Amino acid sequence: MRTTPIAVALISMLAIFAFGSVHAQDRKVMTIGAYTVPNTPWDLNWQDVTAAFDANTDLGLDLELLVRGETGSSEERLNSLRRNRLQFVSSPLGSGAAMIPELAVLQLPFLFESTPESDFVLDEYALPRFQAMFADKGIMFLRWTEAGSNHLFGDRPFLTPDTVKSFPMRVQTTKASSVYFEGLEADAVYMSSNDILQSLQTGLINGGEAVTIFYWMTGIFQEAQHFTLTGHAIEPSSILLNKKFWDGLSPEQQNLISIAYPGPIAARNRVREWMTKIEDDLPGLGVTLHRLNDEQREAWKTQAQSSYGAILESIGGDARDIYDLVLEGQAAYARMKDEDS
């Protein structure tokens, strides 16, 4: 039987539809869970991710972006990640430390001398170690990202360690924060960032610790108009993926994910530039900024170092090994600086 041109065309169309259907079934979806506010640096990061996926639709990987808190708290997102209900999350250090307690070592107060030093140690020394630890939990640790550094806010400045004694203040729930401020005999109240403003308004606390973004964005500055830039603890966040999902991707799909979210330098610079602008704007909002001089910072640092033993013991596990790894990284950074000078 001779096949007519019309039949050939119909057969070709059916083949295209059939291929397209199979192709659609083969496509994978990566659901991202996070909480961010529009027009912040973190929101711009997610916009970059969306743009990268839009430009690479031929790789068979689709994106579902749930970054307005739809997936619950950071702890709930981590649980969903382990169950593969989410495939990609941004997790603050405090939430990650609930799963990997040794992460809290990175928040030892006044541990790092500078942000370049902390960046070097995190990327070159801490990252490989924590990647292995998260892998044991079924999680792929892609890279660090940035949330700023913790400072002190309140109805007064905090220029010396004794100023927090008996002071009712919000403290993070990580071991590094809790043991440290208890050692300073602060009247520590443990709560999430979302509860700070209401607690100030009701008088439960008169101040506390927070990164600049939360101090400004949530309106804390209206209730506690002294902001002391102690920078006593870094606040790195982590970009995490479900390992089973990650392992099931093609090399091209893995590469897309790896490059879609901005790299450590770009992500950190975006946040830090924005933080600097906020700090410059705060005095115009009625905030009094306080910066530690060298003598004051040394007093804080000396006191903080005396608490390290108790903090490491409280963290337990491989905390002392992680601390030694940080010291190794700091020594390598110092050598590198000496060679460059």
Image: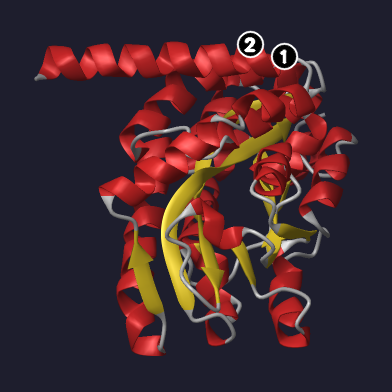
Q: Is residue 30 above or below residue 54?
A: above
Residue at the limit of the structure toward the left, as seen here: 341
Residue at x-position 59% and y-position 85% = 223
Res 181 visible: yes
- The location of residue 29, given as percent across then percent down, is 75, 43
Q: With 306 as the anchor, is 3 left or right in this view? A: right
What x and y, as percent, mark residue 128?
Answer: 56, 15
Query: Mark 2 Cα within 10 Å, few/some/many (few <14, many 20+)?
Result: few
Left or right of 153? Residue 292 is left
Query: Relative to 315, is 45 above or below?
Result: below
Question: Could you tell me the amino acid type at mark 2?
Answer: Asp
Secondary structure under the numbered disc 1 in the rendered image: loop
Give the image location of residue 179, x and y in percent: 72, 40
Q: Is residue 174 left or right of residue 159?
A: right
Residue of label 2 = 321
Tag 2, which secondary structure? helix
Give the labeled residue for mark 1: 318
